[in-house]
Amino acid sequence: MAQATPGTTPHDSSAPGTPGLPEGTERTDVLIVGGGLVGLATAVFLARQGVRAVLAERHDTLAVHPRARGVNPRSMELLRGVGLEEAVRDTVSARALADNAGVIAVESLAGRHLGELRQSYHQDSGADYSVLSPSPWSLCHQDELEPLLHDKAVELGADLRFGREVASFTQDADGVTAVLRDRGAAEGDTSAERVVRARYMIAADGAGSRVRSALGIPTHGPGTMARFVNIRFDADLREVLGDRRFIICYTTAAGARCALLPIDNASRWLLHVIDDREAGSPPLSEERCVELVRAAAGLPDLDVTVHDALPWDAAGLLAGRFRQDRVFLVGDAAHLMPPSGAFGSNTGLADAHNLAWKLAAVLRGEAGEALLDSYDAERRPVARATVEQAVLRSKDRPRLVGQGTAEPDPRLRPDPAVMFHYRYASDAVVAPAPTEGTDGAPDLWEADPRAVPGTRAPHVELELDGQKLSTVDLFGDGFVLLAAPGADWTAPAGAAAGATGAAVRALTVTDAVPAAPGEARSVSASWSERYAAAPGQAVLVRPDGFVAWRSDLPAEAPTPEDTATRSARLTAALLRVLAREGTEAAERTA
Ligand SMILES: Cc1cc2nc3c(=O)[nH]c(=O)nc-3n(C[C@H](O)[C@H](O)[C@H](O)COP(=O)(O)OP(=O)(O)OC[C@H]3O[C@@H](n4cnc5c(N)ncnc54)[C@H](O)[C@@H]3O)c2cc1C
């Protein structure tokens, strides 16, 4: 894939027929390369923010293999925000696997039970997350999730093009010019090419990202740790399964670290097998696949239909940069991790969600370009830490069958921490510099995430105008200022919105019963305790549900400031978050 050095191509104006751009060049705000799970989610989140986006996917169809399936509570919150939570829970796989929990090890399904994963850091989909989130886990297979994302993106106005490959691109100071090629066209047929000019481009083109290579972005990390084949098969295992309802079942009889995964707890299954044959060897024969399935089941005469065998690598990799000028990397293009922990596409969804509101704010002119730098500053450290956690979990799995170290690695963090309790440190957050962790890097994990700037705004169930909802449901459209009773924040929110052009909604939240008209009231827990909010104090939440700023009222001695001071402080914070602090100062000086 070709890529010009940024800034070397001639300046491009936006009029059609511009010199340097072919006649018929199409224009959009964002071009998304790749329509896998993360590319589709990117299209949904951008369209939800009102951004014009074109997505090009080289395949003609959506995924047919049920690859990823663990949609974690944070991702379910993001899907809830675009109205997809119920549809995901209503898929065939999510309904079939709603009561599955746990990781077990057996010789074979018919054989001896060897152990189960009972580590403090591992809380699987059966765990109760209701204190942390309104949205529990869902085990929805990728081949059912992708169509939901596709239809939602189209409904919200995204332009999705399948069978179209991004063959090359160049970028300059104002945008990205890409050539989209019809994959079905004959070699050399230039009529099958369309040129798309976008303000920004997002590479969601997967682990082997050619966009990343074209940009010369290196990757770091342990690399490939093991090669697997994922066999999709039908066999009636109901009798031998009995009433066991696991997420993964390691089976030693079919070879080390083979794992059986249910699709419907009955006749549809996946078997992951280690592929220790030489790289580049021909695909596993159907006969061998049947043999492995029979060994895993412990039933030598089992009737098996193999559908396909998908090779994949368990690898740990991180891109050295998530942004290069006008191009951003998301999903597997940015980070690759072993599936232990099910963090892969969940991390990709969080990337896309983090980027969408920032691009929207810049494109609307509400934020300075520098806001986009915070994408790399926020997501890359989180992705690095998540890759590390997935690798640690992967290395820990042999302990399940009595191999490996006696004790878990002390660096392992509990699943809820990995999903929820990281802290962004960037210019898009107004917070003191983070303390250093043991490795000298800023400490990413927040031990007491009570609405600390840079952390996800905690979930508390509220009642507002007779309706029950989560705080999480308040976020998505513009900024939200949650305030404890004791000071009026409505006028300051209006002043900050007026000064920046950004939407700012002020809402007073009380623990008292009854709440005053227009106030929200805590239902499930004390809001003021969960947000560490003293009377009169306010917390500003970004459209992605992360805390941007909090008013610095000392909790012990609340002194209601005057409205003008509160307005000035909130406006200054918002200008800083939107990367307009310097610009506004310069404008004032001028
Ligand atoms: C066995 C297995 C189990 C997993 N389980 C889980 C799980 O339970 N939970 C979880 O969160 N994650 C899981 N993962 C990880 C998850 O599957 C990946 O992280 C996720 O699918 C990555 O999505 P993506 O969209 O970034 O990349 P991909 O799915 O690789 O999609 C990239 C897309 O880009 C397209 N493309 C590439 N180049 C171009 C181009 N030039 N022009 C146009 N299109 C292009 C490709 O055709 C492809 O469709 C699992 C992975 C594996 C292998």
Image: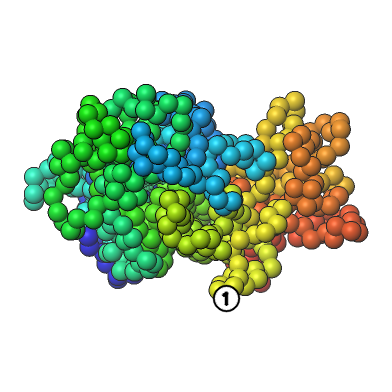
108 left or right of 581?
left
Residue 287 in picture, x, y percent from top left: 15, 38
198 left or right of 566?
left
The quarter of the image holding the N terminus is bottom left
The structure residue drawn at horizontal position 62% and vertical position 51%, both measured from the top left corner, is 456
Amino acid bearing label 1: Gly
Q: Is residue 365 above or below residue 292?
A: below
Reading the image, the residue beneath label 1 is 440
The quarter of the image holding the C terminus is bottom right
The structure residue drawn at horizontal position 79% and vertical position 35%, both measured from the top left corner, is 521
Q: Is mark 1 within 8 Å of ligand 1?
A: no
The structure residue drawn at horizontal position 74% and vertical position 31%, both measured from the top left corner, is 464
* Residue 506 seen in this snapshot: yes
Give residue 108's quadrant in the image. top left
The structure residue drawn at horizontal position 53% and vertical position 42%, both measured from the top left corner, is 124
Q: Nearer the viewer, residue 198 or 23?
A: 198
Residue 132 in picture, x, y percent from top left: 65, 43
Q: Nearer the viewer, residue 320 or 427?
A: 320
130 left or right of 172?
right
Residue 390 in picture, x, y percent from top left: 45, 56
Give residue 170's quadrant in the image. bottom left
Q: Residues within 10 Å of mark 1 (few under 14, many from 20)?
A: few
Q: Specify how the rendered protein is coloured.
A: rainbow
